[in-house]
Amino acid sequence: MATIEIDKVSKIYHGGVPAVSEVDIQIDDGEFIVLVGPSGCGKSTLLRMVAGLETISSGTVKISGRVVNDVEPADRDIAMVFQNYALYPHMSVRENLAYGLKNRRTPKNEIEARVAEAARMLELGPYLDRKPRALSGGQRQRVAMGRAIVRHPSAFLFDEPLSNLDAKLRVSMRGEIKRLQRRVGTTSLYVTHDQLEAMTLADRLVVLNGGRIEQIGRPLDVYHAPASTFVASFIGSPAMNLVQGELHGSRLAIGPALIDLGQAVPTQGAVTVGFRAEDLQVATGGAAAHADTLPLSVDYVEELGSQRLVHGTVGDQAVTVALSSDAPLSGEMQVAVPLGRLHFFDAGTGRRLAWSTAETHRTTTTANLLETAR
Amino acid sequence: MHRTRILDHAVLILGALFLTLPVVVAFMTSSHEAAAIHSKGLMLSPGGHFVDTYEKVLTRQGGFTGQVTGARMMMNSFILGVGFALGKIVLSMLAAYAIVYFRFRFATLAFWVIFTTLLLPLEVRIMPSYEVMSGLGLINTYTGLIVPLLASATGTFYFRQFFKSVPEELLEAARIDGAGPFKFFIDVLVPLSKTMIAAIFIIMFVYGWNQYLWPMLMTTDERFFTLMRGIKQILQVWIGSQIPDYNEAFALAVLAMLPPVLVVVVFQSWFIKGLTESDK
């Protein structure tokens, strides 16, 4: 088992903008870390630097306390699962699984035992003698994972392993990866652009943007207290509503609406206000303006079955509201803002502004709950 | 569905005849006697001298020294063809491997230098090549026949294109699996290139088999004569009133056709199998 320490690691392609700059991540033994971000944010590059497939421009990567900057990928004691599986097409499943072990001069009976073990774990038994081309996408993905497992590496690296699968298979493979990682307890670093995948799999999330870390934290902490507007809009679906507002005393002006916060505010003047679609509710008392409501003019409605997403505007700013599927609809609605669940971000930098005691209290509670649940 | 009509068949039959008739004529004519061919021209019907003509061609000691037989020439051609094809494949695969997978200075330049030699036919460098070979004392050896022709821009180019189409992840997976450059080449790249190797083998074998000018320069000893030279030799005996052995020339030509045909037939089935089955 292993820890991975990524210390001020940067990647600069010749003459260009840094693809990854000064990233610090400490990964504990057995932890499942997910690197998440939009395409081009440097998450794959970072993973490949840990794997040794990409050189490290500056900083150090340590695996189990050993600096591996100049160590060959094969000697880093890691295994990687690739997006397009990268199975050897001319080898049977069994040979694919055994190839890495064979190159390490593992004794024959040991190889057989490990391949059999991995095949049992991944239910690949009946396919051991088939070529990859005779397998379905999900089965190929399992072989790719099997190839990682048989090595008994100190860390797994996953490079968007599920993005070539269809939606349904992706969900079931997601569960399988999680279960498997729990079972073998191997430290894992997982790259994805899918925030849902990130939320469900991660012990801790690392949200990357433009080669920099925006936030590191447990999925629910990140969800409930995004460190920046970027994280707020990236994590959670539908994306968090972000609107421009103005703070005057304890009052918040959003477009035409004026909301009384009734407590201390983090700053004054222009501010970005965030609130999640699912925290908004139709205001009771009909169309009359309230102290804590926003007037929403509805553009269109998306029916998801379990809920309906109402897309509209407040003033000239887009706002999405998630309502239960039987909620009444009308062209002009009053939606109640959850005062305890407002997020404030600096209008210039987009960084989070800490404000109410209630909020900090809530996140620590969820953190504690998670801790005890583990 | 398109219904096959008589016209379609007619076109097909015509095409088939156009391609096979010369071969049929050569084969039929070879089974007649030289005198009959001389007086009546090409034949379309089988004559009665099939066995003895072919036996004579394959086993008769011919040439000035009387040391060379048809079988011997066939073997020489075969050695040339196979050595040529295998050598070219090994050499061009290694060259392409270096160009595609290793980052060294002037790799692109090296590739373009190799590539531009595609434009130069063998004949351009035949004199210097001969000079070098004679300097090394390799005239009248198989080495001298084969080695100078082994560098192949065509082969290198094909393999380069093929290697470039092999997904990068395969190399990365192999690196993580602990396969070094040599292992990756042998364990992954070579098996993946099977179809390409078969294709190049067909092309190069036929090319080597059909070589005429180079063997003629390189070999003065009749023991190293190839079939192509043998055919020429037979037709050269037109001295005085002697009739050339047309039948034997035709028989040799037919024999000369067989190995390439065999190679194509054998390797084509691999080739097609590989094309339809493998996905990289």
Image (tube, grey):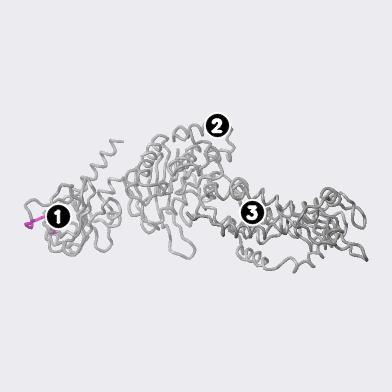
Q: Look at 71% across and 60% down and name the residue there.
A: B151
Q: CA distance from mark 3 to mark 2?
A: 40 Å
Badge 1 crowding class, 10 Å Cα cut-off, few under 14, some 14 to 19, many 20 or more, is few
Q: Which residue is mark 3?
A: B199
Q: CA distance from mark 2 to mark 1?
A: 66 Å
Q: Which residue is mark 2?
A: A110
Q: Look at 50% across and 32% down and name the residue there.
A: A116
Q: Look at 59% across and 33% down and name the residue there.
A: A107
Spot occupied by residue B169 in the image (x, y as percentages of width and height): 51, 50
The numbered mark at residue A264 is: 1
Frontmost of labels 3 and 2 is 3
The image shows residue A171, relative to residue A228, as above or below, that is: above
Secondary element at image label 3: helix
**Res A37 seen here:** yes
The numbered mark at residue A280 is: none
Q: Amino acid at mark 2?
A: Glu
Letter of the chain that mark 2 sits on in the rendering: A
Q: Amino acid at mark 1?
A: Ala
- Does the CB distance between marks 2 and 1 fall below 8 Å? no
Who is closer to the viewer here, A181 or A307? A307
Who is closer to the viewer here, B180 or B272? B272
Secondary element at image label 1: loop
Q: Main secondary structure of the magenta part?
A: loop
**Res A64 seen here:** no
Spot occupied by residue B31 in the image (x, y as percentages of width and height): 81, 53
State left or right for residue B252 relative to residue B187: right
Q: Amino acid at mark 3?
A: Ala
Spot occupied by residue A339 in the image (x, y as percentages of width and height): 15, 52
Instruction: Point out the stretch of residues depicted in magenta.
Output: A287-295
Mark earlier in primary sequence (2, 1): 2
